[in-house]
Amino acid sequence: GLGVEARLTLCNMAVEFGAWTGLVAPDATTVDWLRGRPHAPRGDQWDAAIAHWRSLCSDPGASYDRTLELDCATLAPQVTWGTHPGQVVGVLDPVVPDAEGAQRALDYMDVRAGQVLAGLPIDAAFIGSCTNSRLSDLRTAAAVVQGRRVAAGVTAIVVPGSTAVKLAAEAEGLDTVFRDAGFEWRESGCSLCFYVGGDSFDRPGRPARRVISSTNRNFEGRQGPGVRTHLASPATVAASAL
């Protein structure tokens, strides 16, 4: 049921599950997305390509070492409490530390076992990165902030995932929605997905130390020296900024 943009993110980030790679079998959604794009096959080659793509699926009756089924309808918005993407919990659930590196992560993030993350004050909210700032992500986040305002004392930033995404979002007026809500609308790029000594979340006299971010890594110092990064979906980041 995922759109292609969500599939791209899922497969790209499968390494965070400890996988070599992630695959989603080509289907009608894939074909419709590829049709007419630059470098896509044309004419008879297009028909042959579709036939080949549809063969790239699991064999009937294939067996697996392990099968996991998740009912996303019962899954609460997820937010990381620690310093890697696996240290994560439902936003209304208590923090349950894992065994490896848990105490160091708790100390760095200044959270405690059993704490619920909902209501934890933040200094900044960041919607960006190649994985979670695609056009569909920006549409989702804009729907959350439409007609509302960023909370006082929170620095809120949106960085589109590419120039093409930025232009498409502006054509739909999404930039106006974010700006009217009090978000900064920036040029596309890696930006504060990671810190390289330039830009920061800090404002004069107001250092930003706790950030909720739609980016893809949250290790110590990822977004700046001493910055505590909570990873979440674009929708959850948007809601947290308000």
Image (spheres, helix red, strand yellow):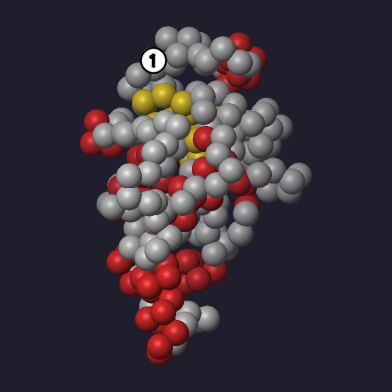
Assess disc 1: are there few (<14), some (14-19) or many (≥20) residues with their C-alpha within 10 Å of its C-alpha: some
Front residue of 136 and 71: 71
Which residue is at a point 48% across and 10% down the rendered structure image? Answer: 113
Quarter holding residue 114: top left
> Badge 1 is on which residue?
94
Left or right side of 17 for 173: left
Across and down, in percent, residue 34 comes to 41, 73
Front residue of 133 and 73: 73
Q: Amino acid at mark 1?
A: Pro
Which residue is at a point 40% across and 88% down the rendered structure image? Answer: 44
Count up the numbered dots. Answer: 1
In this view, which residue lies farthest toward the left? 73
Left or right side of 184 for 107: right
Q: Is residue 231 visible?
A: yes
Quarter holding residue 101: top right
Q: Is residue 176 visible?
A: no
SS assignment at label 1: loop
Across and down, in percent, residue 65 comes to 45, 32
| Residue 7 higher or lower than 207, as above or below | below
In this view, which residue lies farthest toward the bottom? 43
Across and down, in percent, residue 171 comes to 39, 73
Front residue of 80 and 6: 6
